[in-house]
Image (cartoon, grey):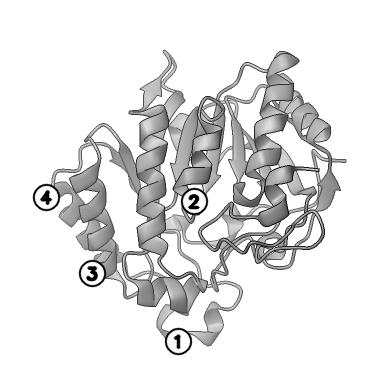
Amino acid sequence: MIKELNNCIICPRKCGINRNITCGYCRVKNQIKLAKACLHFWEEPCISGSRGSGTVFFSNCNMRCVFCQNYDISHEGFGKEVSIEKLAEIMLYLEEKGAHNINLVSPTPYIFHIREAVKTARNKGLTLPILYNTNGYENAEILKSLEGIIDIYLPDLKYYDDKYSIRYSKTPAYFEHATAAILEMYRQVGNPVFNDDGILIKGLMIRHMMLPGLLFDSKKVVDWVLDNLPPQVFLNIMCQYTPMYKAKYFDEINRKLNPKHYESLIDYALSKGLENGFTQDHGSATEEYTPIFDLSGIE
């Protein structure tokens, strides 16, 4: 039993639910639930490298993005419950497979489980950097409990305007909480640090996936990053949006991104002084890059 779950305030929703008895908004009770653990080769080059990122996909989520490409695990809860000890074993297994890092995808509801699992794995010899791959909707105060546990933070910064975060993700005050969380992440891990092979081993990197019709909103996101963080922090501006799950019910986003809008955003970011970042080829907007969740690496 994890005492912090008796009155859960892990994420900004602060449900106050006793997750040792029932589920919170995130649909998570008090057990870890995983959908897949594998070497992942489709992250940023400095994360996947030549051997792959040791990626652990957690089930369920504290957001409700209508376009989520991982909806079968984030919304529908596919996965298998495992213990903290098993999660630690999976981390060690991924290190044995040659992973460059341990990449925790959608980890937010499991912060306290992860803290204990990393400690256990470290005691058993784990040496890889721990990467926290999050939607950004985090409680900055709770993130403080991960100081010294997480080496790399990889948050999304999805929206600037509340009307979009509520319409497409049922998430109020997203920008307020995500930006506060990102500043806390930066306080903990600082600017990116790379090893001799160009692999990221510590620091903050931010992702922003542009949505159709939201060029102005995306520019506001870029503005905040460039105005509030040092130029060493990488910003990955992504064009991989593919209408999936319930996006078909929202005509304005039931289409792929206009390439001209994406190029306009890149030009804007460069004109504002972006020094470090990644862009994507328009061919990345496909379902082919969505993992198949089959419990591999867990059972």
Residue 139 is marked as: 2
Choose mark 3 or mark 2, whichever is in front.
Answer: 2
Instruction: Give the secondary structure at mark 2.
Output: loop
User: Which circle marks residue 271 in the picture?
Assistant: 4
First in residue order: circle 3 vs circle 2? 2
The amino acid marked with disc number 4 is Ser
* Tag 4 secondary structure: helix
Judge left or right: residue 33 versus residue 138. Answer: right
For marks 1 and 4, the one nearer the N-term is 1
Residue 292 seen in render: no
* First in sequence: mark 1 vs mark 2: 2
- Could you tell whether 136 is left or right of 267 in the image? right
Q: Is residue 279 above or below residue 205?
A: below
User: Which tag, 4 or 2, sits closer to the chain's start?
Assistant: 2
Camera-side mark, 1 or 3: 3
Question: What amino acid does circle 2 point to?
Answer: Asn
Which quadrant: the C terminus?
top right
Which amino acid, mark 3?
Phe
What is the CA distance from the residue labelled 1 to the residue labelled 4? 32 Å
Q: Secondary structure at mark 3?
A: helix
The nearer-to-camera label among 3 and 4 is: 3
**Closer-to-camera residue (173/100):** 173
Which one is in front in this view, the residue at disc 1 or the one at disc 2? 2
Identified at 80% across, 49% down, the residue is 31
Which residue appears at 70% of the width and 31% of the height? 116
The residue shown at (46%, 37%) is: 153
Residue type (three-letter) at the residue carrying disc 1: Asp
Q: CA distance from mark 1 to mark 2?
A: 32 Å
Q: Which residue is mark 3?
A: 216
Q: Are marks 4 and 2 in contact (CB under 8 Å)?
A: no
